[in-house]
Amino acid sequence: MVGRLPRVVATHWVHPEVTDYLKEFSAPVVPPEEPGVWPAALRFLDRTGLDLSPIQTHFFPLADGVAAFDFGKKTAECIKITMTNED
């Protein structure tokens, strides 16, 4: 269908600024924020200095989004994928 925006589906809450950015080129489907969960998690990480980078296993540019989602299905190889706005 001409003029229809692609759909981007987030599996968990994303920051409102990210949702606004996604709206520039897609029709995002984003679950509502779970009150208190993310602020508490961020405070915990700030307080403890816990480094989560070891579970950040793969990075993909946004242009390779389909490949990123396909790779994410390989649960034996992948823990967490981040899509970046860089090549």
Image: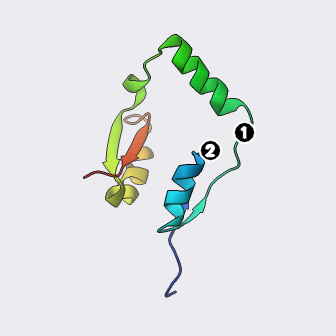
Looking at the rendered structure, the kind of residue marked 2 is Trp
Q: Are marks 1 and 2 in contact (CB under 8 Å)?
A: yes
- For disc 2, the neighbor class at 10 Å (few under 14, some 14 to 19, many from 20) is some
For residue 37, side relative to residue 61 (left or right): right
Q: Marks 1 and 2, Cα distance to the nearest angstrom?
A: 8 Å
Instruction: Choose between 65 and 15: the one closer to the eye.
Output: 15
Is residue 51 shown above or below 36? Answer: above
Residue extending farthest bottom? 2
Instruction: Choose between 44 and 69: the one closer to the eye.
Output: 44
Instruction: Choose between 18 and 51: the one closer to the eye.
Output: 18
Can residue 74 be seen in the rendering of this structure?
A: no
Is residue 62 shown above or below 55? Answer: below
Q: How many marks?
A: 2
Residue 25 appears at what percent x and percent y? 47, 68
The residue at the point 29 percent across, 51 percent down is 86
Residue 59 appears at what percent x and percent y? 33, 42
Residue 38 in which image quadrant: top right
Look at the numbered disc 1 and give the secondary structure of its residue: loop
For residue 52, side relative to residue 48 (left or right): left
Label whose residue precedes the other's in the sequence (1 or 2): 2
Q: Which residue is denoted by mark 1 in the rendering?
A: 34
Q: Which residue is denoted by mark 2 in the rendering?
A: 13
- For disc 1, the neighbor class at 10 Å (few under 14, some 14 to 19, many from 20) is few
